[in-house]
Image (cartoon, rainbow, N blue to C red):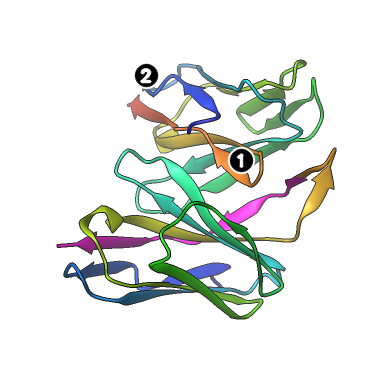
Amino acid sequence: GQQLNQSPQSMFIQEGEDVSMNCTSSSIFNTWLWYKQDPGEGPVLLIALYKAGELTSNGRLTAQFGITRKDSFLNISASIPSDVGIYFCAGPLGGMRFGAGTRLTVKP
Amino acid sequence: DTAVSQTPKYLVTQMGNDKSIKCEQNLGHDTMYWYKQDSKKFLKIMFSYNNKELIINETVPNRFSPKSPDKAHLNLHINSLELGDSAVYFCASSQGLIRIAGEVTDTQYFGPGTRLTVL
């Protein structure tokens, strides 16, 4: 069954707005990964987090590894149309597990 | 150069047929994976190979048989295709398995996917 709960399922925002999505689990994770999937492509790694409490940025993206090790969030600041896609959280739990994805739509 | 490549990109076939999807990576990675993404975009790991040896085999029907002729290739053969096999299949590779606190973790590079449609 689904072991990573990702929310929201989808977001419709205006260009320039900030975006926040998160992932929670009842299990403890030692790594949190955030991927983005563009339409018709495979997922691409955005940010990897390896330590509880870690806050990591990659351009306009910021992700944090929750202190309880059971959650993580991803923020995107000043969204642009090319941010459109599906964002997945992932972590190892007897093999890599993926959240159900957050589908982001950005209106110009 | 494409890091992880899959062929074909699209595959349309009749129920009951046997088909194969090929995957190659030129990253020098030791580990390769197959994932299935359903119509709701849920990504589920199917298999993982490390240095040509099977290390993860999720609950997948035995009609699915992965084959790794060398560590740069991981092919997926599917027998007796069923309607429910329709999905996008992604190959991925990673540098290797790193254990942190007993859990295997690393970052994976995905191929472009193969969209399989079973009619």
Give residue B73's position: percent from left, percent from top. 57, 77
Residues marked 1 and 2 touching at CB (< 8 Å): no
Name the mark nearer the viewer: 1 or 2: 1
Taking depth in this image into account, of A89 and A11 the one nearest to the observer is: A89
Q: Which residue is mark 1?
A: A46
> In the figure, residue B96 lies in which quadrant?
bottom right
- The residue lying at 51 percent from left, 35 percent from top is A88
Magenta span of residues = B104-119
Residue B117 shown in magenta: yes
Q: Main secondary structure of the magenta part?
A: strand
Query: Could you tell me how far apart the alpha carbons at marks 1 and 2 are, in whole angstroms?
Result: 20 Å
Q: Which residue is mark 2?
A: A13
Residue B59 shown in magenta: no
Q: Is residue B11 above or below residue A1?
A: below
On-image quarter of the N terminus of chain B = bottom right
Which residue ends up furthest to the bottom in the rendered image? B69
On-image quarter of the C terminus of chain B = bottom left
Give residue B58's position: percent from left, percent from top. 53, 52
Residue type, mark 2 in image: Ile
- The residue lying at 74 percent from left, 22 percent from top is A69
Q: Is residue B96 above or below residue A75?
A: below
Residue type, mark 1 in image: Leu
**10 Å neighbourhood of mark 2: few (<14), some, or many (≥20)?**
some
Taking depth in this image into account, of B28 and B88 the one nearest to the observer is: B88
Give the numbered dot on residue B23: none
Chain letter for mark 1: A
